[in-house]
Image (spheres, helix red, strand yellow):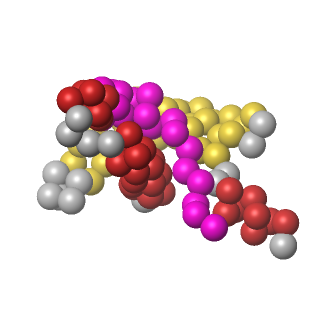
Amino acid sequence: MASAYYEFYRGSSIGMALTDSLDELITSGAITPQLAMKVLQQFDKSLADTMVKSVKGHLHTYRLCDDVWTFIVKNPQFKMESNEVVSAPRIKIIACKNGDAIEAGKK
């Protein structure tokens, strides 16, 4: 069974820019809608996998509602592949169970 990834990150600045670019490519005939969907699915997977890695910062707030965790992290730092450190004053992380985790719990 293919893993189910949530589409939260498509609403981020980079996700919206990707979606806009893919729409333009579809409209111009450069790619098919099916290829665009594959690109978006890979984007979902890549961002979810990246967010699993550690984020350094101060956990300011957390809450759980309907199996959805929300974390507010102040002064987070992300280490990039180039070893550059990127920081921000505050970020919000939304985490959910994926389909595989739900299925594993039923076994």
Depth check: 92 or 29 in front?
A: 29
Residue at the bottom extreme, as displayed: 107
Name the side, left or right, on which 93 lies relative to 97.
left
> Residue 79 at x, y = what percent?
27, 54
Quarter of the figure that contains the C terminus: bottom right
Q: Is residue 51 visible?
A: no
Q: Main secondary structure of the magenta part?
A: helix
- Residue range in magenta is 1-20
Q: Residue at x 75, y 43 (%)?
A: 67
Residue 13 covered by magenta stretch: yes
Residue 5 visible? The answer is yes
**Residue 3 sits in which quadrant?**
bottom right
Residue at 52% x, 39% y is 7
- Quarter of the image with the N terminus is bottom right
Question: Residue 43 at x, y = what percent?
Answer: 38, 48
Q: Answer left or right for 101 relative to 3.
A: right
Question: Number of callouts in the render?
Answer: 0
Work out whether 73 lies above or below 77. above
Residue 91, how many percent across, how many down?
43, 32
Q: Is residue 15 magenta?
A: yes
Q: Name the residue at 35% across, 48% down.
A: 35
Q: Position of residue 84 (x, y in %)?
A: 16, 51
**Relative to 69, is 78 on the left or the right?**
left
Residue 72 vertical placement versus 105 (above, below): above
- On the rendered structure, is 92 left or right of 78? right
